[in-house]
Image (spheres, helix red, strand yellow):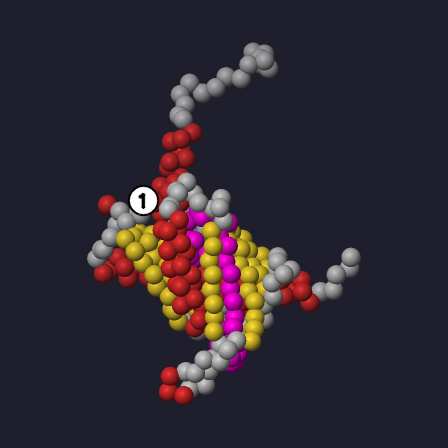
């Protein structure tokens, strides 16, 4: 029987593609680490800079300056003065993901995030090597998809390292969420905006991987069994350990480009 090249016969029975897409989404491992992109040295006006982008769409640009001379402040008990780390965090006007907060609420949120950023970065920087000096970090959130604080911590640590600051270790931030209802025991690493919006609890973990010391733990949301929080903490620490080689490779690549003379 000759073939009819003008018509292609389809199957007698078929299913919508959405059925298979939903099945793939259900089989996704919640422990999977989603892709990220990091690049250093983008800002020529700063002594160190880093850009970090998550798969969820979060984009943050950080710049670092220092050490700059500052007035000496006496420590309690007559201890030697140490350097001071100043952190600033701003949102770009177009960074909001569909939510418009009041100016007062937005300023309070930025101030709280900047304070949290300083608290988790201070243990990673050898401030005793800069007395009396001032180190400054400025973070600009270009797009707030989700996991903003964890991404900002990692980008700020990369910027400080790119500026040549002496550090004990590279601080790595990782965010996760605990789903509500029957999936309360299930946690997701680096949640998307939709997952973060419907989460029962959010957690951001900061780790110094080489020293294996957790310096930051910030959570919010509904309470749950202690075992679920312990599981979330273990998952967050594991995520930080897996993020560390990616960020370290970005640092090595930036150092190699800086050491290689330009042929232009």
Q: Is residue 56 left or right of residue 66?
A: left
Query: Residue 25: horizontal and vertical position, in percent?
Result: 39, 40
- In the picture of the structure, the residue carrying the numbered disc 1 is 198
Nearer to me, 74 or 178: 74
Q: Residue furthest bottom?
A: 78
Work out which residue is located at the far left of the displayed protein and give it. 225
184 horizontally vs 50: left or right: left
Q: Residue at coordinates 42% horizontally, 18% vertically from top-left?
A: 12
What is the quadrant of the N terminus in the image?
top right
When the figure is inspected, residue 222 is found, relative to residue 258, above or below; the finding is above
Q: How many marks?
A: 1
Image position of 142 with respect to 252: above or below: above
* Residue 122 visible in image: yes
Question: Residues in magenta?
Answer: 125-152
Residue 185: tell me if it is visible: no
Image coordinates of residue 158 in percent, x first then y, are: 53, 63
């Amino acid at each position: 029987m000759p073939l009819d090249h003008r018509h292609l016969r389809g199957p007698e029975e078929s299913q919508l593609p959405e059925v298979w897409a939903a099945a793939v989404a259900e089989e996704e491992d919640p422990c999977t680490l989603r892709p990220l992109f990091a690049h250093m040295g983008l800002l020529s006006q700063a002594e160190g800079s880093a850009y970090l982008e998550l798969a969820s769409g979060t984009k943050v640009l950080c710049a670092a300056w220092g050490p700059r001379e500052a007035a000496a402040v006496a420590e309690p008990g007559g201890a030697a003065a140490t350097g001071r780390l100043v952190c600033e965090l701003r949102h770009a006007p177009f960074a909001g993901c569909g939510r418009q907060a009041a100016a007062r609420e937005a300023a309070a949120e930025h101030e709280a995030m900047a304070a949290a950023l300083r608290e988790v970065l201070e243990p990673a920087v050898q401030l005793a090597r800069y007395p009396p000096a001032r180190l400054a970090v400025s973070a600009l959130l270009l797009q707030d998809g989700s996991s903003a604080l964890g991404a900002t911590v990692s980008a700020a640590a990369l910027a400080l390292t790119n500026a040549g600051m002496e550090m004990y270790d590279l601080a790595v931030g990782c965010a996760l969420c605990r789903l509500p209802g029957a999936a309360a025991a299930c946690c997701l690493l680096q949640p998307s905006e939709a997952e973060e919006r419907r989460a029962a609890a959010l957690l951001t973990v900061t780790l110094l991987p080489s020293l294996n010391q957790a310096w930051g733990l910030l959570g919010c949301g509904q309470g749950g069994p202690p075992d679920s929080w312990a599981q979330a903490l273990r998952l967050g620490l594991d995520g930080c350990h897996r993020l560390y080689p990616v960020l370290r490779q970005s640092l090595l690549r930036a150092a190699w480009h800086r050491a290689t003379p330009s042929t232009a």
